[in-house]
Amino acid sequence: MNENARFLARAFEHNGVLYPNGLNTSLIKRPDIVNCREDDVFVVSYPKAGTTWMIEMVSLIMNEGNTEINTSAVQQARNPMIEVNLKLPLWLRCITHLLKFLKPILPEFIIKLRFINLLLALEKAGLEYGNGLKQMEKIPSPRLMKSHLPYHAFPSQAIRKKCKIVYVARNPKDTGVSFFHQYSLGFPPLDYKGSWNDFYQLYVNDKTWYGSWFDHVLTWWQHRDDENVMFLKYENMKKDPKGAVKSITDFLDISLTEGAIDDIVEFCSFNKMKKDENVNFSLVVGDKDKHQFIRKGVVGDWMNFFTVAQNKEYEKIYRERMKGSGLDFEW
Ligand code: PPS
């Protein structure tokens, strides 16, 4: 089996969208099963749009700049991804809990083993992040959650109750390149061994997880003027992070001092986040020199990957799919 076929076999399709195994199929088929509260806030995106960055910003804004919560645990534990359901078997949970107690006496080389590292990271996250819905029930209001769900699969209660939703979009070429690196992070299920050219074939044919970038972004874009939806672009956040923080505080009706806003921008800067093990996945990434979750964080890295032919093909698709949408991106 080639690598693309292997990855496709690890995913399932619903309503024309491909989802990775390890998501909650009940939620995807019945978005009404998610219990939402009126003061819930969601950060939503197609994968690799800058979701982790946005969650750090929004959570700090919601905590009025207090960084204590952000430094207390990995982001997945604080801000559950609602559709995740890893169904960790009981034996794995037991071993993981056991490891927590054994850690002080285990030799360093054992702790550094990738599998042990992964289990310790799960333990640190409180294990529940294996099940987004269960974890959601456990965190206090006002809750901040993450999701990559397309609009039609998004919790209907959140829409009905007008929960605040911050949607972040990134130009699809950089998104694709970042997605390739995510697929290849080097631990299961992110252990893609294909080349960029192989991955491009999945991406251009809408066969990557969460399906077509165009369908995802454009359907959320249609809701950009809903009173509870804010649509932001990664490229604008890069250009003016302070402006992004300010517009989110307005959207969330939270008032912050200039100093607090500056501190949030600084805390969420690329260099800070790259070093922060609560957001950079370094606890689970095996070869840290080779693979990084918080990787380059730039606009235009696609130029280092798209071939001339791929770029020509993608530009044509982009023009066709985006025509008349009124949405454009800087590359
Ligand atoms: S995920 O897995 O879908 O939740 O990934 P996501 O967080 O959406 O996207 C990861 C990319 O965002 C970059 N990133 C940042 N860019 C600028 N500033 C900050 N603070 C920041 N934090 C994360 C990250 O590096 C990934 O992009 P690439 O292009 O791969 O570097």
Image (spheres, helix red, strand yellow):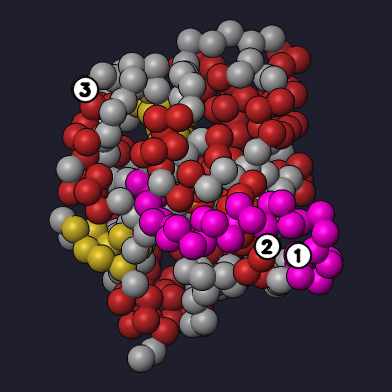
Q: Main secondary structure of the magenta part?
A: helix
Residues packed near mark 1 inside 10 Å, few (<14), some (14 to 19) or many (20 plus):
some
Please rate how many residues cluster around mark 2, counting C-alpha atoms within 10 Å: few if below 14, some from 14 to 19, many from 20. some
Residues marked 2 and 1 touching at CB (< 8 Å): yes
- The answer to whether the residues at label 2 and label 3 have Cβ atoms under 8 Å apart is no
Which x, y percent locates residue 14?
Answer: 19, 58
The type of residue carrying mark 3 is Arg
- Given residues 161 and 253, the one toward you in this image is 161
Q: Is residue 212 above or below residue 26?
A: below
- Residue hosting label 3: 160
In the displayed structure, does residue 45 sit left or right of residue 113? left
* Mark identifier at residue 111: 1
Q: Is residue 237 above or below residue 18?
A: above
Q: Quadrant of residue 181?
A: bottom right
| Residue at 40% from the left image edge and 23% from the top image edge | 40
Amino acid carrying label 1: it is: Ile
Quadrant of the rendering where the N terminus is positioned: bottom left
Where residue 222 sits in the image (x, y, percent)?
25, 35
Pointer 1 or 3: first along the chain? 1
- Helix or strand or loop: what does disc 2 sit on? helix
> Within 10 Å of the Cα at label 3, are there few (<14), some (14-19), or many (20+) other Cα atoms?
few
Mark count: 3
The percent coordinates of residue 3 (x first, y second) are 42, 84
Quarter location, residue 228: top left
Which residue range is magenta in the image? 83-112
- Find the distance from the CA under tag 2 to the CA under tag 3: 41 Å
Answer whether residue 44 is magenta in the image. Answer: no
Which residue: 48% across, 44% down?
128
Query: Where 252 falls versus 266 (above or below)?
Result: above
Q: Which residue is mark 2?
A: 117
* Residue at the (71%, 39%) spot, across then down: 269
Amino acid type, callout 2 = Asn
